[in-house]
Amino acid sequence: IAGITQAPTSQILAAGRRMTLRCTQDMRHNAMYWYRQDLGLGLRLIHYSNTAGTTGKGEVPDGYSVSRANTDDFPLTLASAVPSQTSVYFCASSDGDPHNEQFFGPGTRLTVL
Amino acid sequence: GQNIDQPTEMTATEGAIVQINCTYQTSGFNGLFWYQQHAGEAPTFLSYNVLDGLEEKGRFSSFLSRSKGYSYLLLKELQMKDSASYLCAVVDNDYKLSFGAGTTVTVRA
């Protein structure tokens, strides 16, 4: 693994189903983030974690949950998917210094029908 | 709330210069980033400004005026590979990034 990876690459999901998007980084970054990107709206922060064991809510947290059991992994769970959660999801990580760049994963394209 | 505005689309010719403007009204300011995002790919870091003035990095430069809530990204000697979306993002009082909707730049031969 080099950098930050996400799985799956894409997924079609029936409404009401539970889904977990996976994110793993090997840069030993303290901070990790989940964003969704929708046409015309840009990237919006869903949840974040400043360090292992802690999480916080972003701009659009409803319908999503996260956990940060260790430094490397930051899964995002949709408990009961709805069509409005159709989006491209990006995971990102950083060293935690807000003046330093965030590194983004390749994204997961999720379609909820 | 956060308000970050940038033009939706711009078109320019190969070899030319393009300036992408970004204006912001946010709850606090702790720096401004520009990211590049090619279609279907992840955003990648281009520049960071926290003090007023111009930061030059090769063909790309970024300018910031904190008093005016204004930044621009200048792309010189445009190449076809510069066709991408350019995202302006502000670090707010909570030290989180708020992104504009992005500007899609198309470079034509």
Image (spheres, rainbow, N blue to C red):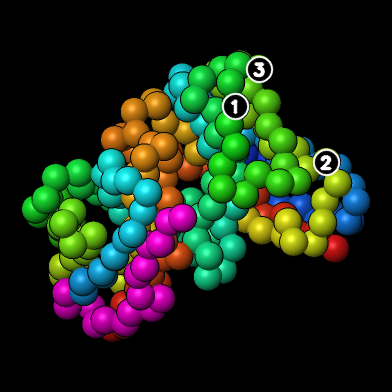
Mark 3 chain: A
Q: Which badge, 2 or 1, comes first in the chain's sequence?
A: 1
Label 3–label 2 contact, CB within 8 A: no
Q: Residue at x 56, y 48 (%)?
A: A59
Label 3, secondary structure: give it: loop
Query: Residue B56: percent from the left, percent from the top?
Result: 11, 52
Q: Which residue is mark 1?
A: A55
Q: Amino acid at mark 2?
A: Ala
Front residue of B49 and B77? B49
Query: Residue B26: percent from the left, percent from the top?
Result: 36, 54
Left or right: B50, with B30 as reference point: left
Reply yes or no: does residue B12 show up in magenta.
yes
Q: Which badge, 3 or 1, comes first in the chain's sequence?
A: 1
Q: Amino acid at mark 3?
A: Ala
Q: Give the residues in magenta.
A: B1-17
Q: Which residue is mark 2?
A: A79
- Residue farthest to the left, as pictured: B53
Label 3–label 1 contact, CB within 8 A: no
What is the quadrant of residue A85 in the picture? bottom right
Mark 2 chain: A
Q: Residue at x 32, y 61 (%)?
A: B24
Instruction: Assign the C terminus of chain B to one quadrant of the image.
Output: bottom left
Reply yes or no: does residue B102 show up in magenta.
no
Question: Where residue A69 is drawn, which disc sits there?
Answer: 3
Which label lies toward us, 3 or 1? Answer: 1
What is the quadrant of residue B77 in the picture? bottom left
